[in-house]
Every structure is written in C-alpha cells, then in structure tokens.
Image: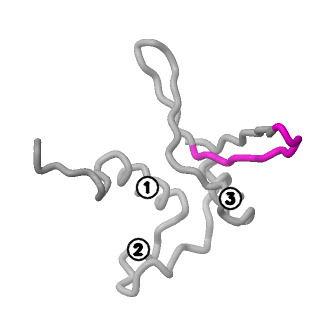
C-alpha cells in the first residue's frame, strides 16, 4: 500500500490536493491499483504518520485510545490500515439489503 497525492484544478484556478491510500496488485491484464481510503481530511501530521508507516517505519508510540479493554493498545497505524482494508473487503455496508438473496 502507498499514499498517492493527486492534484486537481478547477475552472476558477484553485488547486486541490487529494491524499488516497492505494493498494497495488497484479492481474492477468497487468498491474492495477485501487483506493483503500481517502485521508485528505486528516491533519497533515496524521497523514505523515500514515505515509511513514506504509513505508515500513516503526513507531514507539502506539494507539491506546481505541478501547478501554486494552486489546487494541499495541495497534500501530499500519495495523489500523490493515483493519480498514479487511473491513472494506469483507464486511458489507449496513445500507445493503441481503434479505432478497
């Protein structure tokens, strides 16, 4: 996974930057990539931590505020992104109605 920064311009001349966590993979038709999540609205410091984590940097500080039970207390930013990928792949959105299948 990697963070892709995309620059877009509007007619008024304003430039916007989008920060997307992307996943690269190979198919029979060649290499492809898909968006895992959009991190544009996160603070710049948080985006920098995500970029560094995806590049393999390890951190001493862990995310400890996710649960009071402590079972996620050692989760790193990279681990959190792995959970996001898992959740988006395997857990259907709540808005879908599966009663007709």
Determine crowd level at label 1: few under 14, some 14-19, many 20+ residues with C-alpha closer than 10 A.
few
Residue 68 position within the rendered picture, expressed as x and y whole percent measured from the top left: 39, 87
Contact, mark 3 vs mark 1 (Cβ under 8 Å) = no
Q: Is 14 left or right of 84, judged from the image as shown? A: right
Q: In this view, does 16 lie to the left or right of 58?
A: right
Residue 72 is marked as 2
Q: Is mark 1 on a helix, strand or loop?
A: helix
Please count the marks in the image.
3
x, y (%) of residue 89?
Answer: 34, 45
Question: Sequence order check: which comes first, mark 3 or mark 1?
Answer: 3
Residue found at the far bottom of this picture: 68
Depth check: 18 or 50 in front?
18
86, above or below 59, in the image:
above
User: Magenta segment, which residues?
Assistant: 11-21
Distance Cα–Cα, label 3 vs label 1: 15 Å
Question: The C terminus lies in which quarter of the figure?
Answer: top left
Q: Does 14 appear in magenta?
A: yes
- Residue located 51% across and 25% down the image: 32
The spot of residue 7 in percent (x, y) is 77, 39
**Model colouring:** one colour
**Residue to which mark 1 is pinned:** 84
Residue at the spot 42% in from the left edge and 19% down from the top edge: 27
Residue lying farthest front? 12
């Amino acid at each position: 996974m990697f963070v892709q920064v995309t620059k877009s311009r509007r007619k008024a001349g304003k430039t916007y930057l989008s920060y997307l966590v992307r996943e690269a993979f190979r198919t029979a038709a060649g290499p492809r990539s898909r968006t895992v999540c959009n991190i544009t609205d996160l603070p710049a410091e948080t985006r920098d931590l995500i970029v560094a984590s995806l590049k393999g940097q390890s951190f001493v500080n862990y995310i400890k505020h996710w649960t009071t039970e402590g079972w996620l207390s050692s989760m790193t930013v990279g681990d959190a992104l792995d959970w996001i990928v898992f959740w988006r792949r395997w857990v259907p959105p709540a808005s879908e109605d599966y009663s007709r299948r």
